[in-house]
Amino acid sequence: MFDQIKNALSSKQAQQLTDVRNIGLYIFGIVVLAIAWSGARTVQSNYELQKKIATLKQENTVLWLQNQNTYLQTQYYKTDQYLELSARQNLGLAAPGEQVLLVPKDVASRYVDPNLNKTSSVSETAVPDNRAGYIKNLEAWRDFLLGRKLTND
């Protein structure tokens, strides 16, 4: 066994492999591979960081837009138009020269769509809606534009 190893190491090919000039080439090759590996890892980490930067920029843009929306909303709340509308809706006030008509609840409820009544519950014998999708869509838009349905309950 040891003789075979001695013969393998003493052969001409083994001597060429262990020559000082070849060992220098091996070391140079290892250094080149280490540099290439390091470069590949650097490129990969830069790619990951660029993805994070892009995500953070998008989140920053969304937050900025939300900020702008909130700012515009507060500006609207400061306007006389909003104050007048809020007084009309919430306090039942009217502009000078207008008259407020008080309609009894039972009279007013006769002209309101029963589907909008929040206290009514859906009966268990409700008929499924088998209308075509485009008809439902058109009716939903009609109701929305006419102010008939305020919620999606």
Image: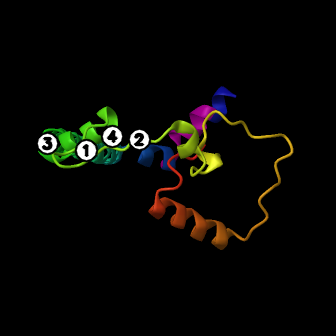
Quarter of the view holding residue 46: top left
Looking at the rendered image, the quarter that the N terminus falls into is top right
Q: Which residue is mark 1?
A: 85
| Mark 2 in CB contact with mark 1 (< 8 angstroms) | no
* Amino acid type, mark 4: Gln
Is residue 79 shown above or below 147? Answer: above
Q: Secondary structure at mark 4?
A: helix
Residue at the farthest top position = 2
Left or right position of 18 against 116? left
Q: Which mark is residue 75?
A: 3
Q: Nearer the viewer, mark 2 or mark 1?
A: 1
Residue 9 among magenta residues: yes
Mark yes or no: residue 74 visible.
yes
Q: Pick the quarter of the image with the C terminus.
A: top right
Q: Tell which tag, 3 or 4, sits nearer the viewer.
A: 4
| Disc on the earlier residue, 2 or 1 | 2
Callout 1–callout 4 Cβ contact below 8 Å: yes
Label 2 or label 3, whichever comes before in sequence order: 2
Residue at position x 83%, y 53% from top? Answer: 127
Label 3 to label 4: alpha-carbon separation: 20 Å
Tell me how far mark 1 sits from mark 4, CA to CA: 6 Å
Q: Nearer the viewer, mark 4 or mark 2?
A: 4
- Which residue position is annotated with label 2? 18
Q: Nearer the viewer, residue 149 or 68?
A: 149
Dot 1: what SS? helix
Mark 1–mark 3 Cα distance, whole angstroms, equals: 15 Å
Residue designated by label 4: 89
Question: Which image quadrant is residue 60 in?
Answer: top left
Query: The magenta stretch spans which residues?
Result: 5-12
Instruction: Name the element at disc 2.
Output: loop
